[in-house]
Amino acid sequence: RGRLRELREGLAARRRTLSAANLLPHPTSTNHAAQREAQELTALSTTLARARSGLVQELVEVFNVVEVGGRPPIGGKAGTKGEWTIGDLILPVPGDIRRYPPDHINAVITHTIHFLSLLTFYLGIKLPFEVSWSGGKLGVGAPSIGATKGSDHGGWAKWHAKHPLHLSSAGPTPSSPSVPKDVPSLSMADSYIESDPQPQSSFTTALAMLLYNVCYLAYTQNVDVPLAQTGDVLSNLWSVCCSADLGRKSHETKPQLPVPTPPSFGLDFAQLLQATTAHPASRSRPRSSRTQGRKSSRKDEPRIVEEEDGWDLVEGGHDGDGL
């Protein structure tokens, strides 16, 4: 009887297994073809990502994007950041732009625009803000930037008006030290509806648009950029180029990305613009007692003076007035 009971239980288990198997979809030629196509598509995507990565590495070498200086943490002492350069030109954070002449800023921004244009072309990424040139061709004339068509997420799509992404040699540089600290900054709505914006605020808005593009590009390549680090443009681009997921997702190929910007991209443009305009990050510089109290040998000769938050470029004169 025990033997018979075991045989019956075994038979019942086999029937249950057979019934479960009958519920599964039977393989057909169509299913086999779909699986084969999926495998080929995966292999193609992997090959394409590898090719994109190779192009990007060559691009980094051609533009010579490197960090110069800095010191790693040694013996319990905190390290210091170096200066990021492209084409042997330093691209400062927004708070340090006033320390460089307009020609330098225009040149390094032009290099960065070219680098970003080629990088997004290789990766097949569409950016929220589009750069155009006064000469009608890439690199010809002066660059300006404005929003393209996209979703309402992030609050950037309404900023379709073009803003100059260059400085005038005769005009003031952004975040000039001569502006009193107690003067309130313009609100986001004021800067948006302004019919004839000042060159300074217009350039700052354009710079914020460029920063937003870089942050969105980093998002597409699975690189997170905190708000406090949005001003480190070249450092963020370097992180993009070193991403383990570089080239895997694109707007041009599958797996295809949604149009800029999806809800999962949490950076709000108004917040970034406010951070860039009102409280631009300034990188601290080494202090030197040799330059403290140094007087100019000629009238109106530029000199470097020391302040609490770093070095500022001012115009020296016998009357003691400075900019």
Image (tube, rainbow, N blue to C red):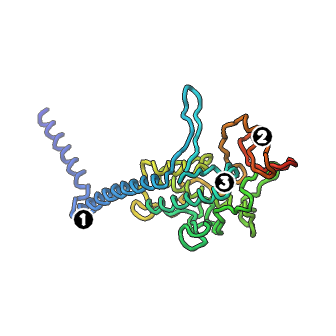
Badge 1 is on which residue?
A: 30
At label 1, the amino acid type is Thr
Q: Position of residue 248 (x, y in %)?
A: 40, 55
Mark 1 residue element: helix
> Crowding near pointer 3: few (<14 within 10 Å), some, many (20+)?
some
Q: Which circle, 3 or 1, is nearer the viewer?
A: 3
206 up-or-down from 86: above or below: below
Residue under the point 28% across and 62% down: 37
Q: Earlier in the sequence, mark 2 or mark 3?
A: 3
**Hey, which quadrant is residue 39 in on the image?**
bottom left
Q: Earlier in the sequence, mark 1 or mark 2?
A: 1
For this rendering, which residue is in front, 306 or 156?
A: 306
Q: Position of residue 134 (x, y in %)?
A: 61, 72
Q: Which mark is residue 271?
A: 3
At label 2, the amino acid type is Arg
At label 3, the amino acid type is Gln
Q: Position of residue 22 (x, y in %)?
A: 22, 55
Q: Is residue 1 visible?
A: no
Residue under the point 51% across and 56% down: 217
